Each structure stands twice: as C-alpha cells, then as structure tokens.
Image (tube, rainbow, N blue to C red):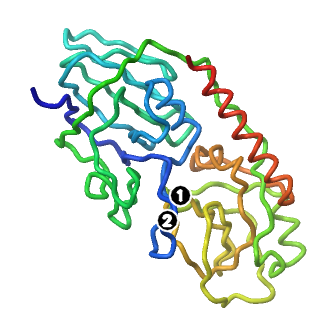
Amino acid sequence: MGDDYFKVIRGGLNSTFQDEGREGLYHIGLPFSGAMDKRNYLIANKLNNNNNNEAVLEFAYQGPLLKYFGKKRNVVITGNVNFKILKKDKSIYNAECYRTIEINDGDTIDILSTNRSVYGYFSVNGGFKLKKVWHSFSTTIRAQVGPNNGQKLIDGQEIKLKEGNSSTQKNLDYIDSNIEFIRVIKGTNFNYFSEQSIKDFFSKKFEVTKLTDRMGMRIQGIKLINDKYTNIKSEGLVKGTIQIPADGNPIILLSDHGTIGGYPKFGVVISADYDKLVQITPGSKIKFKEIDLKDAENLYRLYNMETNNILEKIK
C-alpha cells in the first residue's frame, strides 16, 4: 500500500513546514527560522502525541485547503483559527482549535483564516514524511532552504505522511492571553539616539504596517532620531533585534531575518514576548517597555515553565 497523503487544493497565503528551528548556522548566513509562535507549535504536536520537534504546517492569515487520502487518523489546529471539515458524505463539521479531530479517507480540511492573529499551526498524528535540510524541517523561503524545495505550499501538490502512532482524542482548554506591552532590553547602539527619541519610544504607540512577514516587522509612529552615527559596520544580528534605518521607523527582526546588518540596533524584544509579538496583526498598535537583562532572563525562564505546565496538562 502507498503512503497516506494530503492533496493540496489551495496552498494558502504563506503555508510552510516548520519545526523548532535550525541552530548553529549563522556563520554561513542561515537564520534560525522555525515556528514563529513556538508555544502554539509545541501544543499542536503534543495534542497529536508527536515528538516535540515534529514538523507542522505553519500558515499565515489564510491557510491551506487539504483533501485527505488514507486511513483514519487525528489532526490538530492551534492558534485562533476559523476552519471546517468537509466530510466525504458532504456534511460539514465546524471544528475547534486545541483538540484532536478524526479524519477519514476523502475528508477535506478547509483552514479559512486566522482570527485577530497572524499564525496558526496544523499537525497530523505521526507527522509529515519529509527530509531534513541542514538538520531541520524548517523552511526559509528567501534562502530556498528546507523541505518542499524551500518553498511554500502550492496548489496541486501532494504531501505524504508517516505512519500514525497511537493517539487518543485530546483537548486543551487554552486561550492565548493578551499583553499590554512588548518588553525590550537595550541594544548595542541604544546610546546613539536622542534622549527625546528614547522617551518617545517607550511612551508612544507604534502601528504595525503591512510590510511584515517572517523576516521582519516594520512599525511606524514618531520617528527616532539617531544623533551620533548612521553609518556603522555590519554586525551579527539576533531574532527580535530592533533596527532603526535612516527614515527613523523601526524594523523588528523576526525568525527568517538576515544574519548581519548595518542599521543601528536600538534594542531587542525579549524572548518571553516573542510569541505574542509575531501574532500582532498589521494596523494594530503596540507599546514598548524597557527592562534590564536580568529581568528578561527571569521572564524567559518563567515563560518556559508556563509552556511546560501547559504541555503537561495534555494527557
């Protein structure tokens, strides 16, 4: 018998395979990549009884339309997502996030849209049948690295699946909480900016623009004035870095960011707030709060503890 598989009827706007990311390759220009919202990624795999680092489908705004061919198995969608299951007998099942859903041969999954958020995650019990590239299932489209030839899903392709494992029906009562502000530590060029600009950054609201993707998030508001140096040597970058180009509008680097850059680095979004940051939709307003490195480290440990506690609730 052949592999179970999905036929892609509609690829969605930006549907890619992702896992926890690709470590240790900055020196050859490959970013970490991986799932933008790590907590929702981990929950999707845990509900399906998969390994933590199993590949999932990450989608932005509108997800894929997938027709299933194979034996009965469970699937899960996490995030704030509108979707439905079109059964083979033509009945429609309006499904819910954070619970396993049994699908059968001939069923179709229609991931309609994310709701007041950007990213959602689709996992299948047993996992997708993929080959790792540079030790990871993550897709980096700009570098054309990863499974699926480093590209997003396209209409008409087939996605083969691994054998399913023993999986029971599971659910999680989970609502992703909102936060009042995004917390930031000082960057290496923080003191390049005027006192007024620093005050404005932490007191004014900024708007997320449509120029936002897996590589970076452009925000606009009051312009930040660099009154010392604008031409600096390119340096290594990390996820969450806030760069300020000449026009004074910040760019926040996200998971597929370039590994070096020459814009002044005003600050870095703390790791504990990154999952929340990437789910903020264009047109939304955000505020920032400065904290120190010690607090950032403590908040990261706390966020990981909270994530582990959530995963442990899934039996």
Mark number, residue 288: none
In the picture provided, is 161 more to the left or to the right than 194? left
The x, y position of residue 89, in whole percent, is 19, 9
Q: Which residue is mark 1?
A: 255
Does residue 108 sit above or below 121 in this rendering?
Answer: above
Nearest the camera: 134 or 4?
134
Q: Above or below — where is 146 with respect to 159?
A: below
| Marks 2 and 1, how far apart at CA | 7 Å
**Badge 2: few (under 14), some or many (20 or more) residues near its Cα, within 10 Å?**
many
Inspect the image, locate mark 1, and give the three-letter code of the amino acid beneath it.
Ser
Picture layout, residue 129 above or below residue 209:
above
Q: How crowded is the residue under tag 1: few (<14 C-alpha within 10 Å), some, or many (20+)?
A: many
The structure residue drawn at horizontal position 62% and vertical position 81%, both measured from the top left corner, is 235
Tell which circle, 2 or 1, labels the residue nearer the N-terminal end: 2
Write down the residue under mark 2: 31
Say which residue appears at 50% left-offset and 28% top-offset.
Answer: 46
Quadrant, the C terminus: top right
Question: Residue 256's x, y, as percent?
Answer: 49, 61
- C-beta proximity under 8 Å, tags 2 and 1: yes
Q: Please state if 184 lies on the left or on the right of 76 as rendered.
A: right
Q: Nearer the viewer, residue 21 or 57?
A: 21
Q: Secondary structure at mark 1?
A: loop
Where is residue 184? Give x, y as percent: 77, 58
Q: Residue at 22% of width from left, 27% of height from top? A: 67
User: In the rendered view, does 97 fall on the left or right side of 152?
Assistant: right
Q: Quadrant of the N terminus?
A: top left
